[in-house]
Image (spheres, rainbow, N blue to C red):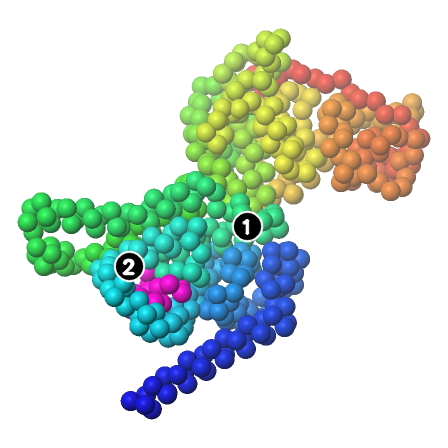
Amino acid sequence: MKNQGRSKWVRKAVIVVLILVGLAIFDYLDVGQYLTLDYFKASQDKFQALYRSHQVLVIGAYMGLYILVTALSLPGAAVMTLAGGALFGLTIGTVAVSFASTIGATLACFVSRLLLREWVQNKFGDKLAAIHTGIEKEGAFYLFSLRLVPIFPFFVINLVMGLTRMRLFTFFWVSQIGMLAGTLVYVNAGKELAKIDSLSGILSPGVIVSFAALGLFPITVKKLLGVYQRKFKTSSHTLEKKVKGNGIRFKPVALLFTTVLITWTAVGNTASFDHSYAGYNALLERFVNEGHVDYQGLMSDTKGLERYLDATADVGKTQFNDWNESERLSFLINLYNAATLKLIVDHYPVKSIKKIGSIFRGPWDQPVVRLFGEDITLDNLEHDIIRKKYSEPRIHLALVCAAKGCPRLRSEAYAAERLDEQLDDQSQDFLSSPAGLHIDRESQVVYFSSIFKWYGEDFIVGYSPTSEFTGLDRIERAVANFSSRYLSASDRDYLKTGGYSVKYLDYDWSLNERASS
């Protein structure tokens, strides 16, 4: 017995020494500076290059470090989860984080049990009896609920559960299921690490409340079964026999079913959205030809347009924010153009979009766009969302206002994987047309579309030249520099030389309608 006791204390002493050594190394090397959001953001390109060269090694090292951080209850797990999403993507990132976090949590629970449970039991044994009984009966449900409520620090849960009699295997699988929803949220957010400035906004209050409510689901069901048992005088043995007779084990099924609900909540309203825009593409191919729209034909068959606008209206803000920037911007451009088509169709026949509405409420002030559960105007969409949130001046050559003076409406939708190419093509097409640009060398005048007069300031940030374009003001130089990129060599050289005056073309507001055959 003496030897057994001495052996137990030796094991404890070794573990304590190892923990202290680990903490000392962590402090001496200042490892904490590498587990910050700023560090990962600054080093993301290096890590991704390393991952492309040594995928298995990087995943293994990442999981090993994550397990160590979690097992020692060190700060940095949330940042590492974001980094997992940034490096590995949603699927591999979720799997790596899920197993690493659960293994680390189980090790922390084990260490807490080995070092502290006996002392706590000897000191408070009589007071802990009821707690142990409760844990044995409903511990899995309590642990599952705690894992879902982000206000409870996970490292505290790991340490406290180590003081109970819950089996480590139960702790492991319940923790893995319970932490899955939060893991998905953080890994998914990590896909756009560069846009995250703090950890506070990743879990919104609505998501936290939803997690907490769903976490109570298994316990609630179990309590209801208890009421049923008492009301109909069904013994627990009989009820258990009925459940098992149907091939069902209550705890895993209840928790897994809840996890399905939570996963749905965690990633927001993730109803599938077709980023290939197959239906909208078919509509544009059918009714748009070289920028001219067959409004009569579209008016006689509006179902395709309505289906597309219904699909865009079903996209939730959380789902939208989970997309990459190209997906979001292409979605908004397509929505603007489709809503404009719908506005014209609803008021057809009309000679010009400017004939819609009144002097007090013009066409761009009509609440014709359904987005994130609200009815907004085309002006709201363009100025308050697209221009405000995306530094991309080429959108002015992609948003089509149903007028002949506008850039041409494409016979295809904008798609994320081709967005940059499409915007360049759209710019070149417009600037090579009479509506976009006209150079009068004889009079030394360059005529730009009035679009550049209205929105020229948007081109300053990305296209202000450092030299050439003499004799022009700040906005004119930026517009001329932008335009020169899409012109022939002779026209480009002429614009760069400067010494000409800039004027703006009259805008043709007549409807961009296809001529009747």
For marks 1 and 2, give the CA distance: 29 Å
- Asked if one can make out residue 436 in the rendered structure from this viewpoint, the answer is no
Query: Which secondary structure is most common in the magenta stretch?
Result: helix
Q: Where, quadrant-wise, is the C terminus in this rendering?
A: top right
Q: Is residue 333 magenta?
A: no
Mark 2 = which residue?
140
Q: Secondary structure at mark 1?
A: loop
Q: Which residues are magenta?
A: 158-174
Q: Position of residue 169 (x, y in %)?
A: 31, 68
Of 25 and 295, the residue lying toward us: 25
Mark 1 = which residue?
199
Q: Position of residue 45 (x, y in %)?
A: 65, 60
- Asked if one can make out residue 101 in the rendered structure from this viewpoint, the answer is yes
Of 123 and 473, the residue lying toward us: 123
Q: Position of residue 200 (x, y in %)?
A: 54, 47
Q: Is residue 283 above or below residue 511?
A: below
Q: Is residue 185 above or below residue 237?
A: above
The amino acid pointed to by label 1 is Leu
The amino acid pointed to by label 2 is Ala
Task: Name the outermost residue toward the top.
Answer: 359
Q: Earlier in the sequence, mark 1 or mark 2?
A: 2
Task: Name the outermost residue toward the left.
Answer: 233
Q: Secondary structure at mark 2?
A: helix
Query: Residue at the location (32% across, 70% down)?
Result: 123
Where is residue 86, by image quadrant? bottom right
Q: Is residue 507 above or below residue 382?
A: above
Of 61 and 487, the residue lying toward us: 61
Which label sits on residue 278? none
Mark 2 Cα-neighbour bin, 10 Å: few <14, some 14–19, many ≥20:
many
* Pointers 1 and 2 in contact (C-beta within 8 Å): no
